[in-house]
Amino acid sequence: MRFTFLGTGTSGGVPMLGCSCEVCKSKDPHDKRWRSAALLETGSTRILIDAGPDIRMQLMPLEFKKPDAVLLTHIHYDHVGGIDDLRGFCSFGSLDIYANEHTAQGLRQTMPYCFASKLYPGVPLLNLHTIQPHHTFRVGDIDVTPVEVMHYKLPILGYRFGKLAYITDMKTIDAGELPYLEGVEMLVVNALRFEGDHMAHMLVDEAIAFSRRVGAKQTFFTHLTHQIGFHDDANRRLPDGFQFAYDGMEIEIK
């Protein structure tokens, strides 16, 4: 499998609109971060994880190939705001969207034109599947297991794919969820910044501690703000086995 980071930024992206800090002015492409999204592929299957407001530009350089599934973590705009831009793939047929009940209901409210009895010509054709934590399903040749984490008080979904787990926007996790991450060797997880606190997102130290609870051999941090600092400098602050991901980074998973 090949895992591609399409975006590693938080809701404001990097650079942030109106910010003149040194990171936002950086010319290093590693310091440019679209909103968080990812792509998981095998030779026969393509899975898109989240579709935020940058998804059109994130997908434009890639092969025009319909995703076999779009997995949504939660309803917040920086994770679903670009679903309408996926309409081009509907030339191949409807898109299979997988989400928990809260996210599915949110999509019906925010995109009612996609779920009307009579669809306006050209709207995205969405086949919405409501999924539950721990209920594994198969997309092509990939097994997908949803895992529930807490984004402040909002239950959202992370996803496990064999030895790989992808979790974003997490602050806490119930101990009862940890058995579903047992055996994960490669972890992608959010780490907002180094200093301060945040009620809805883990900071770097919290993300490191969580990875060690899981027992992952390699951990990649995503959903990063400009406050993380310059990419190369920030990576030098991490212990072995941890690194900050960057937009366009690819990981091969055996």
Image (cartoon, rainbow, N blue to C red):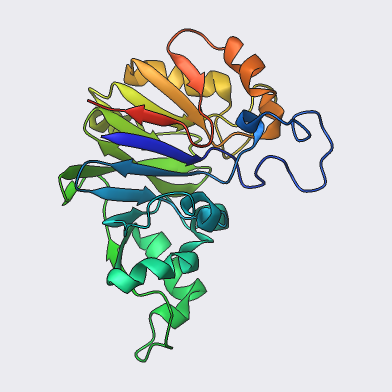
Residue reaching furthest bottom? Answer: 118
Residue 75 position within the rendered picture, expressed as x and y whole percent measured from the top left = 48, 58
- The answer to which quarter of the image holds residue 108 is bottom left
Q: Nearer the viewer, residue 173 or 83?
A: 83
Please give left or right for residue 28 compared with residue 109 in the image: right
For the point 61% across and 37% down, the residue is 199
Q: Quadrant of the N terminus?
A: top left
Q: Is residue 119 above or below residue 142?
A: below
Residue 148 position within the rendered picture, expressed as x and y whole percent measured from the top left = 35, 43
Residue reaching furthest top? Answer: 240
Q: Nearer the viewer, residue 84 or 88?
A: 88
Q: How many marks?
A: 0
Q: Quadrant of the C terminus?
A: top left
Q: Nearer the viewer, residue 21 or 158?
A: 21
Q: Is residue 189 above or below residue 113?
A: above
Q: Is residue 196 above or below residue 118?
A: above
Residue 21 position within the rendered picture, expressed as x and y whole percent measured from the top left = 82, 32
Can I make out residue 212 in this image? yes
Please give left or right for residue 191 compared with residue 212 in the image: right
For the point 46% across and 55% down, the residue is 51
Can I make out residue 105 in this image? no
- The answer to which quarter of the image holds residue 92 is bottom left
Please give left or right for residue 224 compared with residue 101 in the image: right
Residue 186 position within the rendered picture, expressed as x and y whole percent measured from the top left = 33, 24
For the point 19% across and 47% down, the residue is 44
